[in-house]
Amino acid sequence: MKKLMKKIKFEGIDNWNRPVFKAKDSRERFGCIHELFDYDATEMDVLSKVNEEDLCYFGNSFNCEPMGTNPGKHIEIAPILNPNFWDCECESNYIHAKTQKSCEFCGAIRDEQPDSRQAEILARTN
Ligand SMILES: [Zn+2]
């Protein structure tokens, strides 16, 4: 049986300190009402404490009152990607700038590899 996964991405922390996720292809918002965060919490902070099972349906806009209903369909948290970087196949130091066409260590080619995760890029430069 094919499961239809709705991909959602971290959008931010709302005025009530709740983490909010937005569906990729609609205005639907999902969030967590039992784990609260500072306003400047990052995607990585939130994902270390919250997963799909903690989320409920909020509504169609950021900062709306939560409807509180169970999503009812399968949702999947998709990491935020940064289009300026790509991942090669190396075990470490696998993040490359898009200006680099290939990795000299593993031979991965930029155009065949996925974009890098924003959280991993931030972790690397901290
Ligand atoms: Zn490599």
Image (spheres, rainbow, N blue to C red):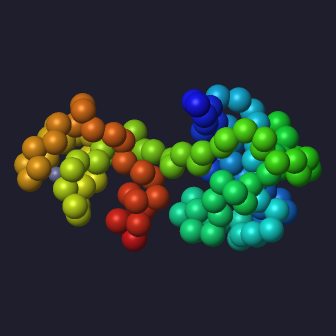
Q: Horizontal placement of 19 versus 6: left or right?
A: right
Q: Is residue 53 left or right of residue 72?
A: left
User: Could you tell me residue 81's position as x and y percent?
Assistant: 45, 45
Q: Is residue 52 above or below residue 62?
A: below
Q: Is residue 45 above or below residue 71?
A: below
Q: Residue at x 72, y 60 (%)?
A: 54
Residue at x 24%, y 31% (from the top left corner): 111
Closest to the observer, 34 or 40: 34
Question: At which x and y percent is residue 115?
Answer: 36, 42
Q: Position of residue 22 (x, y in %)?
A: 69, 42
Q: Position of residue 112 (x, y in %)?
A: 24, 33
Q: Residue at x 76, y 59 (%)?
A: 32
Image quarter of the N terminus: top right
Look at the image and tell me whether residue 77 can be seen.
yes
Is residue 62 in sight in this rendering?
no
Query: In the image, what residue occupies the spot 22% across and 61% down?
Result: 91
Left or right, 103 with respect to 18, comes to: left
Look at the image and tell me in which quarter the C terminus lies: bottom left
Q: How many marks?
A: 0
